Every structure is written in C-alpha cells, then in structure tokens.
Amino acid sequence: MTDTPPPPLEATTGDSPRASVIWLHGLGADGYDFLPIVDQLDLAGLVDLRFVFPHAPLLPVTLNNGCVMPAWYDVIAIRADAPEDEAGIRASARTLETLIAREGARGIPAHRIVLAGFSQGGVIALHTALRHERRLAGALILSSYLALPDRLAAEASTANRDLPIFMAHGTLDNIVPESLARRSERRLTELGYEV
C-alpha cells in the first residue's frame, strides 16, 4: 500500500451505540461516499448504531492504466478468469479486522457488527466476514462478488457458516458484471451459505 489513509468517518444514530456497521466504499471513492446513507435509512426504533466508513489507501490500479486512486486492492481486470491481487485483498482484510477489533474495544462485540460494502469494498467485506474467527451479525454486499472463491472452503470460519448474507446487484451496473455476482452466489450456495 502506498499511503496511510485518514481515520475512518463515523456517524451514530444515538448517544449510546450498541451495534456497528462498518461500510467500505468502492474503487476510486472514499469514506464520504456512503456517509449520507445514515440519514436516508429509516432507523427509528432500532438500537443506537455506529456507522464506520473507512478510506481505502491510494494504490496504482492496473485496470485504470496504473492511475493512483483510492483502492482496497489492485484490479487487473473484471471478469471471472482474471488474476486477483491476493496480497492486496488480504492486506485490506487485515485492515478491516483491525476495525472490527477496534469496535470490540469500544464495547461492540463481533456478533453486533455488520460488514457492508459496495463494489470493491463489498469484495473485502464479504472476504473478511466469511473468514472472521468470531460470529458477526451479517454481511451486506452491493454490486460485488466473491474474491478467491477457490480458497473459501479451506479458509471459511466455522463461526460464520450461517452468517446472514444479503447480496444485491444493479442490473444496469456497467462496471462489475452481474454475472460475477451470480457466480459468487452460486459458489456460496454450493458451500452451504444462505444468500
């Protein structure tokens, strides 16, 4: 990674958060991308929540001619048979693990944390959620896909084998093909996950 991003943004829905949502943005965006969603969601009557919106580091992205931009990992191409930046994916997963631990230190146990992500951020959220050693509350994955699908069976955490997973994909998404999301859903289902 080429830099240290600024601290994550945070928003709360009340004075005493008892659960957290860690939400990762997509390629080229930053933590501000989904900050407005907190006010747009109808969260009245729910427990007080803390939303955490981290910023990806600046990286050169092969797909974009090596341009340096906020990225959770390098993208060589967006297709099922494209090589994946395993080292970058795992590095960002470690960053997310650090944020989960930070929430734990602030009194929010893992089983009250949802990992959410859009596009490239969804890749990291899903990758981490399926491998996290403690039970999480769920995964919210938008316009994204499962990275390193052939490694999941060996690396999956037993604590999250029945993790609630919500995946949605825009039918007009011209960046991440819907077919990658469908392929990911099939792989997760084959491994016994409910999506």
Image (cartoon, grey):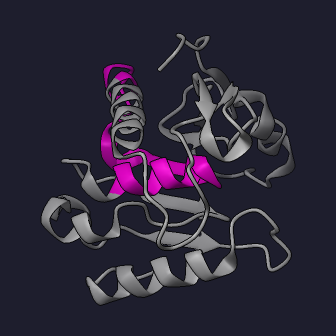
Question: Is 160 drawn above or below residue 103 in the view shown?
Answer: below
Residue 22 at x, y percent in the picture: 53, 39
Residue 37 at x, y percent in the picture: 80, 45
Q: Residue furthest front?
A: 65
Name the chief secondary structure element in magenta: helix
Nearer to the camera, 82 or 167: 82
Nearer to the camera, 125 or 91: 91
Q: Identify which residue is drawn at 41% across, 27% down.
A: 99
Q: Identify which residue is drawn at 47% across, 21% down.
A: 1
Quadrant of the image occupied by residue 155:
bottom left
Quadrant of the image occupied by residue 135:
bottom left
Question: Is 28 drawn above or below residue 189 in the view shown?
Answer: above
Question: Is 10 drawn above or below residue 72 in the view shown?
Answer: above
173 displayed left or right of 2: right
**Which residues, given as a range, are shown in magenta?**
102-129
Query: Residue 176 magenta-drawn?
Result: no
165 displayed left or right of 42: left
Can residue 5 be seen here? Answer: yes
Query: Residue 107 magenta-drawn?
Result: yes
Q: Identify which residue is drawn at 37% across, 22% down.
A: 102
Nearer to the camera, 106 or 124: 124
Nearer to the camera, 62 or 101: 62
